[in-house]
Image (spheres, helix red, strand yellow):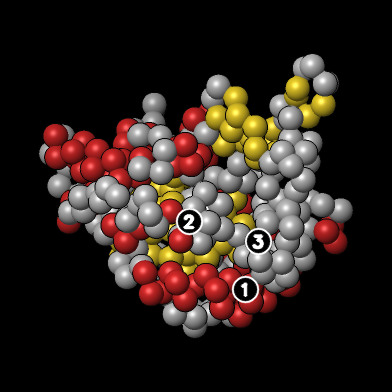
Amino acid sequence: MTTPVTTSRLAVELAGLSLQNPLFLASGTAGYGRELDAVLDIDALGGLVTKAVSVEPRHGAPAPRVAEFPAGMLNAVGLANPGVEAVRSEHLPWLAHRVKRARILVNVVGSQVEHFAEVVARLDGVEGIDGFELNVSCPNVRAGGMEFGADPDTLREVVSRARAQTRLPLFTKLSPAVSDIARAASIALEAGSNGLTLINTMPGLLVDVESRKPELGFGSGGMSGSALLPIGVLATWKVWRATKAPIIGAGGIGSATDAVQYLVAGASAFAIGTAALRDPRLPARLVRDLASWCEVRGVASVRELTGTLEWPS
């Protein structure tokens, strides 16, 4: 196991949370932490966002669930998870015992508006949880499958209901496919979100040309990986410029300089996913590389980078 070096140079504040460094493991890529314990010191990172948690267990999408292409990966896991009660009784106690310094955010999903608040209510006060990430990119079954984040009124209701159930920080995770991501971010913040995660995956399709069928069992899926980097950086800049809110930048990060792009565009922290799936030891190296990048350039604190993008006049 390789432990990254953590220094005061990398310490950041995020919606009231003190982080020893700005790196999170993104939701869906690290399970509930235990899966990576043998290869990665989670407690030396900034934090971990758990795999999705829903009210009832979800079996997820049919196999195959993952397909790779040169610039990334397509996945349709279907938010498979054991349900909130199993997560509360089996997974969160392990995290509370094992992780003492890294911050833990629980990713919350639902198929109806009230489900988000119900999960938050059942987990609020559980030891080891530092906040919640609301995945409003999942489909609302009562609205014909429209994403919760795509409708302003629905987005506002999801966040405000969740807000009423906890005093812990809420981060709303938005899809880059919404028509106006800055407006969606503003609505989430007005409804009670303390910060934002930008961005979720982009919808995509890969075709097996021999069978002429989709490569994924579900058909389409969410695109992640390096191809998502410029989309996520632009979304971060748009939202930062409009709101100055705390942002966790996510999408396509595979190196320290990728992470710096998000910070300069307005993020206070960042999350890596697909790149860590390919190489679970990458997060430790990335933290060390970020510290070295700052040291070489005389950056006393990584916080100095946030929102420093010089837009062309």
Disc on the earlier residue, 2 or 3:
2
Q: Which amino acid does label 1 sit on?
A: Ala
Q: Distance between the residues labelled 2 and 3?
A: 14 Å
Q: Mark 2 points at which residue?
A: 35
Residue 72 percent coordinates (x, y)? 55, 30
Question: Residues under labels 1 and 3: Cα distance?
Answer: 9 Å
Earlier in the chain: of badge 2 and badge 1, it is: 2
Q: Which of 211 and 162 is in front in this view?
A: 211
Note whether residue 191 is visible: yes
74 horizontally vs 242: left or right = right
Q: How crowded is mark 3: few (under 14 residues within 10 Å), some or many (20 or more)?
A: many
Q: Disc 2 to disc 1, how far (Cα)?
A: 16 Å
User: Quick one: 68 or 138, which is closer to the camera?
Assistant: 68
Query: Which labelled disc corresponds to residue 98?
Result: none
Please determine whether, in this image, residue 285 is positioned above or below residue 162: above
Rendered residue at 77%/38% (across/down): 217
Amino acid marked by disc 3: Asn
Q: In this view, does 124 lie to the left or right of 2?
A: right
Amino acid bearing label 2: Glu
Residue on which the image places disc 3: 81
Residue 152 x/y as whole percent: 70, 57
How crowded pointer 1 is (Cα within 10 Å; few <14, some 14-19, many 20+) is rated as some
Q: Is residue 113 above or below residue 140?
A: below
Q: Mark 1 points at which residue?
A: 86
Name the element at disc 1: helix
